[in-house]
Amino acid sequence: MRFERLGILLLGSMASLIGILAIPNPWIQSVYANEQFNSEAQEVCPTPVLSRLKRHRLATGETVDSIARQYNLIPATLLGMNPILQRQPIAIGEEILIPPHNGIQVEIPPGRRWQEVAKAYHARPDVVFEINGCQTQPTVLFLPGVNWSPKGPPIPALSVLSGYPLPQPTTIQMGYGWQLNPVLGQVVFHSGLDLTATVGTPVLSVGAGKVAFAGEREGYGKLVVVNHGSGKQTRYAHLDNIGVKVGQTVNLGDVLGTVGTTGQPDSEQPHLHFEIRYNSDLGWIAEDPNPYFKVRR
């Protein structure tokens, strides 16, 4: 269950910049600088993503979340492509650029090759090459599947979130990051882990904290959100029953509810959708839960 809900700016994590800075203003014409297409590439390669940007004029009542949903994108993509969205309130009447895919735009520093940039962001070179129109010497790259983040990758707080959200470790139905959603039949950004469990299995808090939300939310179904120390937050979705209230203090291992199938699960098999997020100036940003669990294996 994936997607960025709760009316908050819900963003995904990204790899270390390694000295490479995202472009503050995405000018389309820079895509074509130094492009060197051979005749074969011109026939088989798609038009570069950055030449297919759409324009959207901001209207009253719109939010980053609502615009992202309109174009089937995640908020992180819009924030990275359009710095004006990082300011509050949103400037009504301004135009923003909408890419056809989720990802970020990156300038290639002088003396660097585009392959080095792709590697720094853990992006597949073959995919990057094709989606950028098979340019051999681009000055700007669009990196699909990479999420803009205001502060770079988060630092896991292993001492704060030291537990496991179920009584016993289980299999992962759907991992964190870009995954094939079997229900939609599309590759989507999955902001947590889907942990296999039978309906009625107790759901446990992975650390001490305070309940920030306990109720129903679109997509998530019955959801419990717990705020922890060190700017961390955990989310437990698709619950059958909720056993805590907003404002309640919980400890490591306390029962928050039980596994269910409410909301819009990513598969028919019952599971707990579990997320870890970290606080930033732009809201709660999705964080990969895997480092927390790998330490205990």
Image (spheres, rainbow, N blue to C red):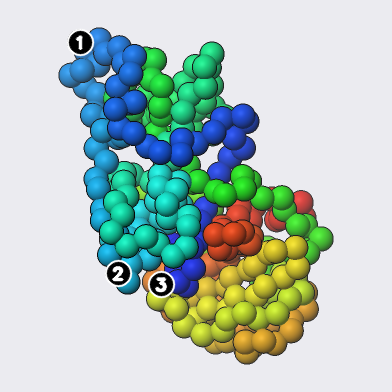
Residue beneath disc 1: 39
Assign a secondary structure to mark 3. loop
Q: Nearer the viewer, residue 30 or 170?
A: 30
Assign a secondary structure to mark 1. helix
Q: Amino acid at mark 2?
A: Thr
Q: Is residue 25 left or right of residue 152?
A: left
Q: Is residue 8 left or right of residue 73?
A: right
Q: Earlier in the sequence, mark 2 or mark 3?
A: 2
Between the C-alphas of marks 1 and 3, the distance is 47 Å
Task: Report crowding for label 1: few under 14, some 14 to 19, many 20 or more residues within 10 A (C-alpha).
Answer: few
Q: Nearer the viewer, mark 1 or mark 3?
A: 1
Residue beneath disc 2: 60
Residue beneath disc 3: 219
Between the C-alphas of marks 2 and 1, the distance is 47 Å
Residue 175, position as x, y percentages in the image: 53, 53
Assign a secondary structure to mark 2. loop
Does 134 appear above or below 292?
above
Q: Earlier in the sequence, mark 2 or mark 1?
A: 1
Name the residue rendered at 52%, 26% in the picture: 117
Between the C-alphas of marks 2 and 3, the distance is 25 Å
Q: How many marks?
A: 3
Q: Amino acid at mark 1?
A: Ser
Name the residue rendered at 31%, 46% in the picture: 97
Name the residue rendered at 40%, 62% in the picture: 90
Residue with the most extreme right position: 159
Residue 181, position as x, y percentages in the image: 38, 55
Does 183 appear above or below 209?
above
State if disc 3 and disc 2 touch (CB < 8 Å). Answer: no
Does 129 appear above or below 66?
above
To which quarter of the image does residue 61 belong?
bottom left
Name the residue rendered at 24%, 28% in the picture: 46
- Whether residue 246 is visible, yes or no, is yes
